[in-house]
Image (cartoon, rainbow, N blue to C red):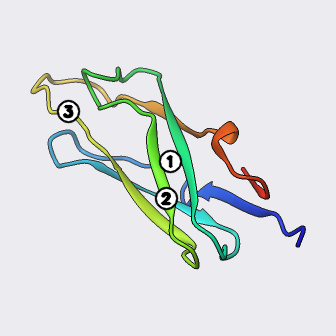
Amino acid sequence: DNTIIMVNFSQSTYSVVEGSGPAQLVLVLSIQSATVITMLVTSTNVTAFGGNDYISGPYVVTFPAGVTSVSFDVPIANDNIAEHNETFDLTIDSTSLPSGVTV
């Protein structure tokens, strides 16, 4: 079978209020897989800094066989400092994807 499975975030942006808990993100597959799919999601600082503002990745995300949507948490630090909105980027590490799965 030469079916290609696409994986993406369910939304292009997410937001969370500092101190309200982790950012919960969702990855989705275009179709079900008969096997388990595990991948890495990496983080890149933009204006938020890993270790200070959030716990940086990589994050291991696993789709059980037959499941097309999986959530994972990114812990957000509450530094009690009044700040403007801060951002970081998350990327599905394409080198971690099994054969037949693409971004």
Q: Which of 86 and 37 is in front in this view?
A: 37
Q: Disc 3 marks which amino acid?
A: Ala
User: Which circle's residue, 2 or 1, is located before the other in the chain?
Assistant: 1
Q: Nearer the viewer, mark 2 or mark 3?
A: 2
Residue 65, picture quadrant: bottom right
Mark 2–mark 1 distance (CA, rounded to whole Å): 21 Å
Looking at the rendered image, the disc whose residue lies closer to the viewer, 1 or 3, is 3
Disc 2 crowd, CA 10 A, few/some/many (<14, 14-19, 20+): some
Amino acid type shown at disc 1: Thr
Task: Pick the residue in front: 100 or 87.
Answer: 100
Q: Say if 32 sits above or below 73 in the image.
A: below
Q: Locate the N terminus and report the quarter of the image it occupies.
A: bottom right
Q: Name the residue under label 1.
A: 13
**Residue depicted at x 70% and y 52%:** 98
Dot 2 amino acid type: Thr
* Label 3 crowd (10 A; few <14 / some 14-19 / many >=20): some
> What residue occupies the far right of the structure in this picture?
2
The image's mark for residue 62 is 2
Which of pointers 1 and 3 lies earlier in the amino acid sequence? 1
Q: Which residue lies furthest to the left in this view?
A: 80
Q: Tell me the mark number nearer the camera, choosing from 2 and 1.
A: 2
Q: Where is mark 3, residue-wise?
A: 77
At horizontal 15% and vertical 33% (from top left) the residue drawn is 78
- The residue located at (37%, 30%) in the rendering is 56
> Where is residue 25 drawn, in percent x and y?
42, 54
In the image, taking residue 71 as reference, residue 94 lies left or right, namely right
Task: Estimate the x, y position of residue 32 in percent, counting from the top left.
Answer: 66, 76
